[in-house]
Image (spheres, rainbow, N blue to C red):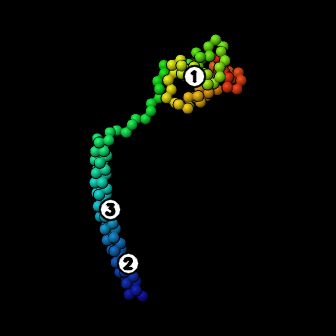
Amino acid sequence: MKATTKESITKLQERLADAKARVSALEAEKLEIEARQKADVARLKSIAKEMRSIVGRPAKSKKRAKNDRTLSAYIVDVLADGKSMRLKEIAQSVKDAGYKSKSKEGFLSCVATVLAKSEDFTKVERGVYTKA
């Protein structure tokens, strides 16, 4: 029984030595891969820089239009003197008064939201508003 225990300890020590050798080999391989990865990243950055110099910068995103007053203030002016107007008429009058918006289809929704949420305006009937 003692010989078997010695043999199994020896086999375990051999397996442990093999595992340590594999771990060392894998760690060396990992270091090589990391070094290649750093070189690849540097090369990609260089390519991207070269492409930017050839193609130019990507287009900037659309910035919001600047207005001197809020949309609500423009609507108050449009609905002055107790006028009642339809939603589309209000939106057009606000634009005619100088309000700038880059929104094409969404501007009508913006106006409708301001009219619905603000206490400055009253809904007279469906789609028709007046100043409160």
The residue positioned 61% from the left and 28% from the top of the image is 113
Horizontal placement of 80 versus 66: left or right? right
Residue receiving disc 3: 30
Which of the two labelled residues, at mark 1 and mark 3, occupies the earlier sequence position?
Answer: 3
Inspect this view and state whether residue 82 appears: yes
Callout 2 secondary element: helix
Inspect this view and state whether residue 38 appears: no
Disc 3 crowd, CA 10 A, few/some/many (<14, 14-19, 20+): few
Specify the quadrant that holds the C terminus. Answer: top right
Callout 1 secondary element: helix
C-alpha span from label 1 to label 2: 87 Å
Q: Residue furthest right?
A: 125
Q: In this rendering, is residue 42 above or below 7?
A: above
**Which one is nearer the viewer's eye here, 20 or 47?**
47
Residue type at tag 2: Leu
Residue 85 locus on image (x, y percent): 65, 20
Residue type at tag 3: Lys
Residue receiving disc 2: 12
In the drawing, what numbered circle is on residue 92?
1
Disc 2 crowd, CA 10 A, few/some/many (<14, 14-19, 20+): few
The residue positioned 52% from the left and 30% from the top of the image is 103
Horizontal placement of 7 versus 99: left or right? left
Q: Residue furthest top?
A: 81
**Which one is nearer the viewer's eye here, 38 or 19?**
38
Residue 82, quarter of picture? top right
